[in-house]
Image (cartoon, rainbow, N blue to C red):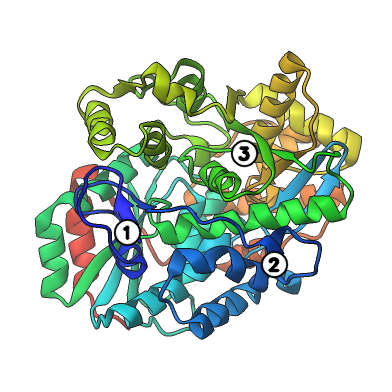
């Protein structure tokens, strides 16, 4: 069962939490009780990723048929090479969890390749005949992963539509081409004139507007979300931390205490929150290192126990972290308040009305598992260069932020526990930043200024090929396929026009 972070309204079933995405009061759904891990997942016996996923996730989806859930998890694994969604690569004292082996080369695939099946099971259990209209705000990777997971080219729509909003000047050229070239039944991609926070705020406003739900209902649809505010996005991420710990142990990379620290580059706080849930469930995790870029609102929050979005917004080389309102932090704040929904609602109201809130000393003490820091582009680039020079290992700009923050905090504290770094995206999605970081010759740093979207993407694809050759790697097929991908979505709207754009998308026939 699931409850809202903002009210004492009655708990809802897993299927209702999945289908609604966000609670009617604007809160986020959290499990009424966090289950303990099945002892089998902490034992040394072999487990496939699908079997591990079942043992971790089944308690969260009580009432779902076992056969259906197992089938969904088996199908998910087939979307990854060798049915291994989260391979571990150990480099020195760090284990890199490569979460970019899926169809869109980003960690969002680990949940979104499963989400469609989970929604299908939820619809069956709820005996729902309505179509589901999924609204997505993306800072770059979630959009394409949602499209690939829920509106897959060449496959029937199964009653699901996906509407993706992305900041027109806040994603890489490759990310934009991935989304705008996605041609599948029920898929709509729309650029907005604003940043990710604007997109996220706009989507939340649509959910909160009764007229939007009424419009969808009049067309036999219900609105839901594929952002990490939806528990179907958040919970599957717990699995790969359990998988990583098992792999670290098998490789002899853990210390005598069997504990690993975790370093996560994060903006919307979902990925690192999944690690925190894993720790609550009994996974031997020590510190949780929360790494931010120049949009350091999370680093400041954990340092000062005060959240304040009233600050400049920076567009950086790690665009998926260019966020000032971290939605998933609300779930952690809820637990910090002692699971007090009225206090949580008051804090979130302060955030909406004043742009800031502050925790009490008692609430702040509940966050002791976390250490936080930030790194700018220069620091992240130097960390990536050192890693490549030492280990011949490429990381994308987001992962580079995590490495830089981890090194900085470790230098200050003197701690040295074995650490898992979540590698959240393929370096080939950000070829210019990565090439510049490792010192690849011929990178002038001019960026994409003066280039149209298609030309900018082709320029990045050329650079990605050079980068692959320099690193002795093969360019992923998903990147190579973009070269001839036609653009099929070119809409661009003002923030105020987002709901109208959704209504137009839902009015079109579903092929």
> Reading the chain from its start, which is encountered first: label 2 or label 1?
1
Residue at figure coordinates x 80%, y 60% from the top left: 474
How far across and how far down the image is residue 500, in percent?
A: 17, 57
Residue at figure coordinates x 75%, y 40% from the top left: 259
Residue at figure coordinates x 22%, y 56% from the top left: 10
- In the picture of the structure, the residue carrying the numbered disc 1 is 21
Examine the image and state in which quarter residue 212 appears.
Answer: bottom left
Horizontal placement of 17 versus 409: left or right? left
How far across and how far down the image is residue 362, in percent?
A: 41, 21
Residue sitting nearer the eye, 275 or 453: 275
Q: Quadrant of the C terminus?
A: bottom left
Horizontal placement of 509 versus 326: left or right? left
Q: Is residue 91 visible?
A: yes
Q: How many marks?
A: 3
> Reading the chain from its start, which is encountered first: label 1 or label 3?
1
Examine the image and state in which quarter residue 331 appears.
Answer: top left
Q: Nearer the viewer, mark 2 or mark 1?
A: 1
Q: Secondary structure at mark 2?
A: helix
Residue sitting nearer the eye, 49 or 218: 49
Q: Secondary structure at mark 1?
A: loop
Categorize mark 3 by other alpha carbons within 10 Å: few (<14), some (14-19), many (20+): many
- In the picture of the structure, the residue carrying the numbered disc 2 is 477
- In the picture of the structure, the residue carrying the numbered disc 3 is 264
Q: Is the residue under label 3 in contact with that under label 1 (CB below 8 Å)? A: no
Categorize mark 1 by other alpha carbons within 10 Å: few (<14), some (14-19), many (20+): many
Q: What's the mark number on residue 132? A: none
Q: Quadrant of the N terminus?
A: bottom left
Residue sitting nearer the eye, 428 or 321: 321
Q: Nearer the viewer, mark 3 or mark 2?
A: 3
Report, in whole angstroms, how far the alpha carbon at label 1 lies from the one at label 3: 24 Å
How far across and how far down the image is residue 99, in percent?
A: 66, 54
């Amino acid at each position: 069962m699931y409850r809202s972070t903002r009210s004492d309204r009655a708990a809802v079933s897993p299927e209702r939490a999945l289908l609604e995405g966000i609670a009617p009061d604007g809160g986020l759904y959290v499990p009424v009780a966090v289950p303990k891990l099945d002892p089998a997942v902490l034992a040394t016996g072999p487990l496939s990723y699908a079997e591990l996923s079942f043992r971790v996730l089944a308690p969260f989806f009580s009432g779902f048929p076992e056969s259906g859930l197992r089938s969904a998890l088996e199908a998910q694994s087939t979307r990854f090479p060798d049915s291994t969604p989260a391979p571990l690569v150990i480099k020195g004292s760090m284990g890199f969890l490569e979460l970019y082996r899926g169809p869109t080369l980003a960690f969002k695939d680990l949940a979104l390749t499963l989400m469609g099946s989970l929604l299908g099971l939820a619809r069956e259990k709820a005996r729902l005949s309505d179509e589901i209209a999924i609204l997505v705000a993306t800072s770059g990777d979630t959009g394409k992963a949602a499209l690939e997971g829920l509106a897959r080219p060449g496959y029937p729509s199964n009653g699901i539509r996906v509407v993706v909003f992305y900041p027109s000047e806040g994603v890489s050229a490759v990310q934009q081409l991935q989304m705008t070239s996605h041609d599948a039944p029920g898929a709509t991609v729309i650029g907005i004139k604003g940043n990710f926070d604007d997109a996220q705020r706009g989507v939340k406003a649509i959910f909160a507007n009764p007229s939007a739900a009424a419009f969808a209902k009049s067309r036999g649809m219900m609105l839901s979300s594929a952002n990490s505010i939806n528990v179907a996005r958040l919970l599957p991420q717990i699995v790969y931390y359990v998988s990583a710990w098992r792999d670290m142990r098998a490789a002899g990379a853990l210390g005598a205490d069997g504990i690993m620290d975790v370093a996560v580059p994060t903006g919307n706080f979902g990925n690192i929150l999944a690690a925190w849930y894993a720790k609550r469930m009994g996974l031997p995790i020590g510190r949780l290192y929360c790494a931010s870029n120049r949009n350091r609102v999370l680093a400041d929050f954990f340092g000062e126990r005060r959240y304040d979005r009233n600050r400049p917004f920076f567009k950086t080389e790690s665009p998926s972290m260019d966020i000032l309102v971290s939605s998933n932090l609300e779930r952690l704040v809820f637990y910090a308040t002692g699971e007090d929904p009225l206090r949580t609602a008051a804090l979130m109201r302060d955030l909406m009305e004043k742009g800031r809130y502050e925790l009490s000393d008692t609430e702040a003490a509940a966050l002791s598992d976390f250490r936080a820091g930030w790194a700018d582009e220069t620091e992240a680039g130097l960390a990536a260069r050192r890693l490549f020079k030492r280990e011949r290992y490429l990381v994308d700009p987001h992962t580079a932020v995590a490495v830089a923050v981890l090194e900085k905090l470790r230098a200050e504290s003197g701690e040295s526990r074995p650490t898992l770094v979540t590698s959240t995206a393929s370096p080939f999605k950000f070829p210019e930043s990565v090439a510049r970081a490792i010192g690849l010759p011929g990178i002038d740093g001019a960026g994409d200024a003066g280039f149209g979207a298609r030309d900018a993407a082709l320029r990045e694809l050329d650079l990605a090929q050079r980068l692959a050759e320099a690193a002795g790697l093969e360019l992923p097929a998903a990147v190579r396929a973009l070269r001839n991908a036609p653009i099929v979505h070119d809409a661009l709207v003002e923030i105020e026009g987002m709901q109208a754009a959704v209504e137009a998308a839902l009015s079109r026939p579903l092929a």
